[in-house]
Amino acid sequence: MIDSMATSAALQDEVTDDGADFVKALVARDESAWRRLFAANYVNLVRFARARTGNQSLAEDLAADVFLEAIKGIRRFRYRGRPVRAWLFKIERHLIADHFSRQKRRPHVSLESAVKEPASRTEIGSVEAKSDIVSAAASLKPDQQEVIFLRFIHDLTPVEVAEAMGKRVGTVHVIQHRALAALRSRLGPREES
């Protein structure tokens, strides 16, 4: 699992600047391009779905479904300078919403699972700090949890988060600001070392 996470992180760095040529390769159904996209994003899509659903098996199924939907819809995708991964997260959000619509219940958001396995570029300090962050984050509104999760666990830019959530960039900044203020008030002042 750790090897696959490291490989995923390295490939994500490689695919982050996916550009128009990469999208053209995806549209042309280039197997190598699709393999790179899958390897770079699958683990993060599973984490995101697991945090939203609380179910590992369902998360893996949803992440796989993202790629099926992406393959079906790649010809309609218009490259506008934003990474394809933002589009993948948008697809996954819709699949999760569809799942819960069918289940007729609200999603259970568990940031604990995401913090247990932080993204390779994200470091969250000690076990005690993780526990405090998870407890504080659990009391945030669902959209605040989602913004914090996408921004700081998955390192998406505000533009990518806005695209994935179907919101304006300014709205994402406001949600992030309010979420961070709420976390600060719940966690109290930081001690200087």
Image (tube, helix red, strand yellow):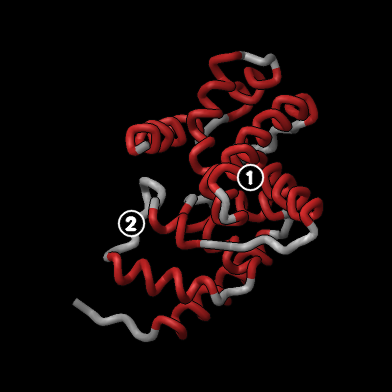
Residue 1 seen: yes
Q: In which quadrant of the rendered image does the N terminus lie?
A: top left
Which amino acid, by three-letter code, is at mark 2? Glu
The answer to whether mark 2 and mark 1 are in CB contact below 8 A is no
How many numbered marks appear?
2
Which amino acid, by three-letter code, is at mark 1? Phe
Of callouts 2 and 1, which one flags the residue occurring earlier in the amino acid sequence? Answer: 1
Rendered residue at 81%/51% (across/down): 102
Q: Is residue 14 left or right of residue 149?
A: left
Rendered residue at 75%/62% (across/down): 105
Residue 158 seen: no
Disc on res. 123:
2
- 10 Å neighbourhood of mark 2: few (<14), some, or many (≥20)? few
Q: Is residue 56 left or right of residue 70?
A: left
Q: In which quadrant of the rendered image does the C terminus lie?
A: bottom left
Nearer to the camera, 45 or 28: 45
Rendered residue at 69%/28% (across/down): 68
The picture places residue 12, in percent across and down from the top left corner, at 46, 35
- 10 Å neighbourhood of mark 1: few (<14), some, or many (≥20)? many
Please give the residue where the numbered disc 1 appears in the rendered image: 89
> Residue 33 lies in what quarter of the image?
top right
> Residue 129 lies in what quarter of the image?
bottom left
In the rendered view, tell whether residue 191 sits above or below residue 1: below
Nearer to the camera, 188 or 132: 132
Q: State the CA–CA distance, disc 2 to disc 1.
A: 22 Å
The picture places residue 141, in percent across and down from the top left corner, at 63, 73
For numbered disc 2, what is the local secondary structure?
loop
In the rendered view, tell whether residue 128 sits above or below residue 191: above
The picture places residue 140, in percent across and down from the top left corner, at 57, 74
For numbered disc 1, what is the local secondary structure?
helix
Disc on res. 159:
none
> Residue 133 lies in what quarter of the image?
bottom left
